[in-house]
Image (spheres, rainbow, N blue to C red):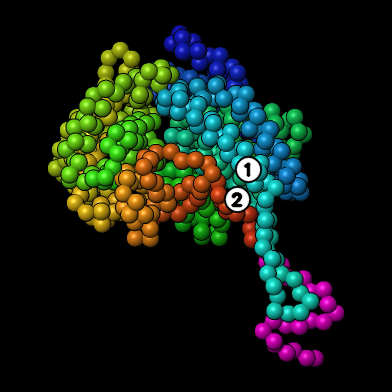
């Protein structure tokens, strides 16, 4: 390992999490194996190699599926509250490893240390939530039209749940799905992003401790660090009852089609193009904080990042000037240094997309009031650091209609609230949205059926981030899926209607007579 890695204290973190210089990317229970190609994980923080991973091949995939099928037959018979106890223990392990795992997330993905720690806290929170849900997997009872009959509904486990996650939340999204899938009696197979494989291996190492300590069947939790071909097998496999996919709209459309063709179930968390409406009645101080964090947090690489600010004409100049001033105070650098506000993009491909988006915006007529650039020099050797930028645009610009995973903020002026809501909704995506206003009527209209068409709509908070207590997801090209809290557990189960006849007669429904 390089001297720089040792200077950051990452060497100890990797050791504590069971990460070696060379790792095998397939894990079933506590067993590791791999027959695929070797990939390398480089940190966008400093460009240094963190570790190597031998990826999963086709034979590894088949072994994981077979082991998962066997594990499901045993795991589904464990009572739900006892499955909840397993999740509770995972939450305790995550508390134990929070500092190390948060640091690894920050170093391998590039988000700030506080955001990395916050992501692990989300994992802990969803475990706590799932433990409670494990004692509340309820159905409904209905009155039958036939005397001496009882009707009710109940939910059963699905089987194997495949989880395909993106690089920007390399651990939290896995836990959102896994904690709920497990308490419902399912087993999980995780295909993480190839850009953040070590985070996945670390999580599996933590889970392996729980599996071993409770003598649980192998295969309730498996990891496949692999390329898109193995991901495609997971999507197409009839033995995988549910596929939860987080990623681009383009790939999500393919996942949805392929899973539907085999009559499987899918949860899709795809692109976002999120806006904050800043009303003439907004608290401007609050609005600036929400807008800046939403736009530059995680270097604009959140699906809930703020992409557009729709600002009332009467406060437009004030908001614009204050944003320019705030951006001038941003500190960009090593995300492990808590004094920095913005870390790097995930890799140089992301930097290229950032540059291309700026170029396209200017070609369409975007006026950049804070120019973007790729940062160079000491501390920026990885080539992944960019300057957050701001542009005045029209919502109709093609580049504005697309999600760019980078810190580019677009400003749009409006006159009436109806116009602002129309602008907010006039994009293909529908994930997160917000309005900043102290006007009750505006707030209620924004939240009404005539308001935001997004899966998440907020008042006086930004678009970025979400609490695990509420269902997370969006509409339109965001996919329509829901993860995390609320009654999302139902996505991970199959619904069954039951009728019991406790008489000696067999009356038919709707009064039908059938006499022999």
Labelled disc at residue 130: 1
Quarter of the rendering containing residue 380: top left
Q: Where is residue 416 in the image (x, y as percent from the top left)?
A: 22, 54
Residue 11 visible in image: yes
The magenta segment: 497-516
| Proximity of marks 2 and 1: CB atoms separated by less than 8 Å | yes
Q: Would residue 402 appear left or right of 213 to someone viewing this image? A: left
From the image, tell me which residue sits under label 2: 489
Q: Does the magenta stretch include residue 255?
A: no
Residue at position x 51%, y 59% from top? 260
Q: What element carries label 1?
A: helix
Q: Is the magenta stretch mostly helix, strand or loop?
A: loop
Q: What element carries label 2?
A: helix
> Counting residues from the N terminus, which is met first, the one under dot 2 or under dot 1?
1
Labelled disc at residue 55: none
Q: Would residue 501 appear left or right of 67 to someone viewing this image? A: right
Quarter of the rendering containing residue 320: top left
Q: Where is residue 203 in the image (x, y as percent from the top left)?
A: 59, 30
Q: Position of residue 77 (x, y in %)?
A: 76, 49
């Amino acid at each position: 390992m390089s001297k720089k890695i040792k200077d950051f204290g990452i060497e100890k973190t990797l050791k504590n999490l069971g990460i070696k210089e060379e790792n095998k990317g397939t894990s079933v229970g506590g067993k590791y194996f791999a027959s695929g190609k070797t990939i390398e994980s480089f940190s966008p923080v400093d460009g240094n190699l963190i570790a190597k991973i031998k990826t999963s091949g086709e034979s590894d995939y088949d072994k994981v599926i077979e082991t998962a099928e066997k594990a499901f037959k045993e795991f589904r018979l464990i009572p739900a509250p006892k499955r909840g106890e397993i999740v509770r223990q995972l939450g305790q392990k995550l508390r134990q490893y929070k500092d190390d795992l948060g640091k690894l997330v920050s170093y391998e993905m590039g988000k700030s240390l506080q955001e990395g720690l916050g992501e692990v806290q989300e994992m802990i929170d969803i475990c706590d939530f799932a433990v409670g849900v494990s004692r509340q997997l309820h159905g409904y009872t209905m009155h039958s039209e036939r005397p001496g009959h009882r009707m009710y509904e109940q939910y059963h486990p699905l089987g194997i749940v495949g989880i395909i996650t993106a690089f920007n939340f390399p651990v939290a999204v896995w836990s959102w799905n896994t904690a709920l899938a497990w308490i419902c009696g399912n087993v999980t197979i995780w295909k993480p992003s190839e850009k953040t494989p070590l985070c996945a291996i670390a999580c599996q190492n933590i889970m392996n401790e729980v599996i071993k300590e409770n003598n649980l069947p192998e295969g309730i939790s498996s990891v496949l660090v692999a390329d898109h071909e193995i991901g495609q097998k997971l999507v197409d496999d009839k033995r995988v009852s549910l596929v939860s996919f987080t990623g681009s709209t383009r790939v999500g459309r393919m996942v949805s089609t392929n899973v539907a063709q085999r009559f499987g179930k899918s949860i899709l968390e795809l692109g976002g193009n999120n806006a904050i409406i800043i009303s003439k009645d907004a608290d401007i101080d609050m609005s600036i904080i929400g807008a800046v964090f939403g736009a530059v947090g995680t270097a604009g690489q959140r699906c809930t990042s703020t992409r557009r600010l729709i600002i009332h004409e009467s406060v437009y100049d004030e908001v614009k000037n204050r944003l320019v001033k705030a951006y001038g105070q941003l500190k960009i650098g090593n995300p492990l240094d808590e004094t920095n506000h913005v870390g790097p993009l995930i890799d140089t491909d992301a930097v290229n997309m950032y540059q291309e988006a700026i170029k396209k915006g200017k070609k369409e007529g975007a006026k950049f009031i804070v120019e973007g650039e790729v940062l160079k020099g000491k501390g920026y050797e990885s080539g992944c650091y960019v300057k957050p930028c701001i542009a005045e645009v029209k919502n109709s610009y093609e580049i504005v209609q697309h999600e760019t995973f980078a810190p580019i903020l677009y400003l749009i002026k409006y006159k009436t609230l109806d116009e602002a809501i129309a602008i907010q909704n006039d994009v293909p995506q529908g994930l997160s949205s917000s309005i900043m206003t102290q006007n009750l009527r505006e707030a209620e209209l924004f939240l009404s059926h005539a308001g935001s068409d997004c899966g998440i709509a907020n008042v006086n908070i930004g678009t970025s981030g979400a609490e695990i207590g509420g269902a997370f997801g969006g509409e339109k090209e965001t996919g329509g899926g829901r993860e995390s809290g609320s009654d999302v557990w139902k996505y991970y189960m199959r619904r069954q209607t039951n009728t019991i006849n406790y008489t000696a007669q067999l009356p038919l429904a709707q009064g039908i007579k059938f006499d022999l």
